[in-house]
Image (spheres, helix red, strand yellow):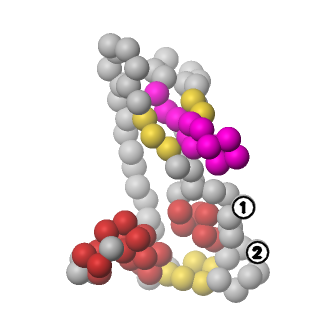
Amino acid sequence: MGSKGLEVWYPPTQDWIPVPPKEGAYVINMGDMMQKVTNGWYRSARHRVNSYGTNHRYSVPFFLNGQLKYKAKALDGSGMETTVGEHIRGRLIDTMGESGKKLM
């Protein structure tokens, strides 16, 4: 079975909560795009991984953004609409500031 280390941020208590390993299970972070199209119903979890003890811990991140020109509309009927590419560009600029604009 896997090792401990994955933690998610819990805003109401301002604390990191451990996610216990469960045999035969995967933990999936829904991501920012899912948060956007569900208008916050599903949230992208702030998370981190710590290595406790001397055992090796393997983490395999996989990022799937989708077709860049795909128009994503909010599922709640609010009218929010963006393309996957616009969303990724916005996140890049949020992360890197002005230098992020140069990469697009």
Residue at image location 64% in from the left, 48% down from the top: 11
Drawn side of residue 92 relative to residue 81, left or right: left
Asked if one can make out residue 61 in the rendered structure from this viewpoint, the answer is yes
Q: Which mark is residue 75?
A: none
The kind of secondary structure element at disc 1 is loop
What residue is disc 1 on?
Answer: 41
Q: Is residue 3 above or below residue 34?
A: above
Q: Which residues are magenta?
A: 5-16
Residue 1 colored in magenta in the image: no
Q: Earlier in the sequence, mark 2 or mark 1?
A: 1
Residue 14 colored in magenta in the image: yes
Please say if the residues under marks 2 and 1 sit with CB atoms less than 8 Å apart: yes
**Whole-percent x, y for residue 19 in the image:** 58, 31
The kind of secondary structure element at disc 2 is loop
Using the rendered view, name the quadrant where residue 8 is placed: top right
Q: Which mark is residue 76?
A: 2
Which three-letter amino acid code belongs to the residue tagged 2? Asp
Which three-letter amino acid code belongs to the residue tagged 1? Trp
**Whole-percent x, y for residue 64 in the image:** 43, 59
